[in-house]
Amino acid sequence: DAGVTQSPTHLIKTRGQQVTLRCSPKSGHDTVSWYQQALGQGPQFIFQYYEEEERQRGNFPDRFSGHQFPNYSSELNVNALLLGDSALYLCASSPLDSYNEQFFGPGTRLTVL
Amino acid sequence: GQQLNQSPQSMFIQEGEDVSMNCTSSSIFNTWLWYKQDPGEGPVLLIALYKAGELTSNGRLTAQFGITRKDSFLNISASIPSDVGIYFCAGREAGAGSYQLTFGKGTKLSVIP
């Protein structure tokens, strides 16, 4: 049973560019959350998707947007990249009956130059 | 926004020693979770707690949901070298419509053989 998968593993972009990160949830999970983890910090909640809708959003600007597909996979888009967007971006999935227990993927390391 | 205070920030212990770390919040939480993160990996869920006063074990790990619902503790008994990593507490605030997890800044554990 595959766990949460994310792609790509690493990504290098320049300021002002746009990026799309992808996530496939664990089998049987229908809820996907995205987190940003800066170096030396704990993950910070960006948003959560359920039934293809953004259910809750953290304190992130509109440059951060997302999407969930009918197969529950999800994308995170970041526009107009800033140097401060450099971080590990984590996707977490949860099952229908227990959205408290979030299982994380390995993350995508984004570097903005 | 809400932040969790996790302590200590780092620990150096001898193999075989017991370890304790804790997490406090300024508001009431419905759920407390403990994760471990290894370098280059996503956090791995260790223990989930759902009721005030609950004490739950997972092998050598034991965690407790504080009676006030504003804190949680994690203990590791008889530490071994593979316990090395960063341990994060995370919680979900009480209240309708709250789905996000809030994380602490982590406790970095080093085990000296």
Image (cartoon, helix red, strand yellow):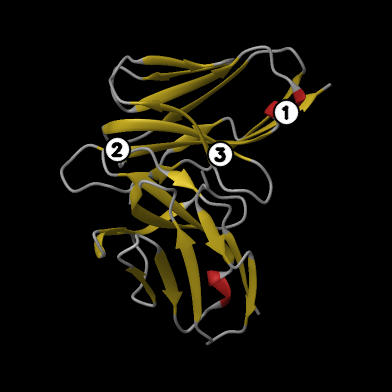
Spatial distance from mark 2 to mark 3, Cα to Cα?
A: 24 Å
In this picture, is B92 found above or below B11?
below
Disc number placed over residue B106 in the picture, else none: 3
Image x and y of residue B32, in percent: 37, 31
**Occupied quadrant, residue B91:** top left
Q: Please identify, in this view, whether the residue under mark 2 or under mark 3 is nearer the observer.
A: 2
Q: Residue at x 81, y 24 (%)?
A: B112
Q: Are marks 2 and 3 on the same chain?
A: no
Image x and y of residue B94, in percent: 22, 37
**Label 1 residue SS:** helix
The disc numbered 1 marks a residue on which chain?
Answer: B
Q: Please identify, in this view, whether the residue under mark 1 or under mark 3 is nearer the observer.
A: 1
Mark before the other along the chain sequence, 1 or 3: 1
Q: Are marks 1 and 3 on the same chain?
A: yes
**Occupied quadrant, residue B19:** top right
**Label 3 residue SS:** loop
Query: Which quadrant is home to the C terminus of chain A?
Result: bottom right
Disc number placed over residue B82 in the picture, else none: 1
Image x and y of residue B44, in percent: 54, 38
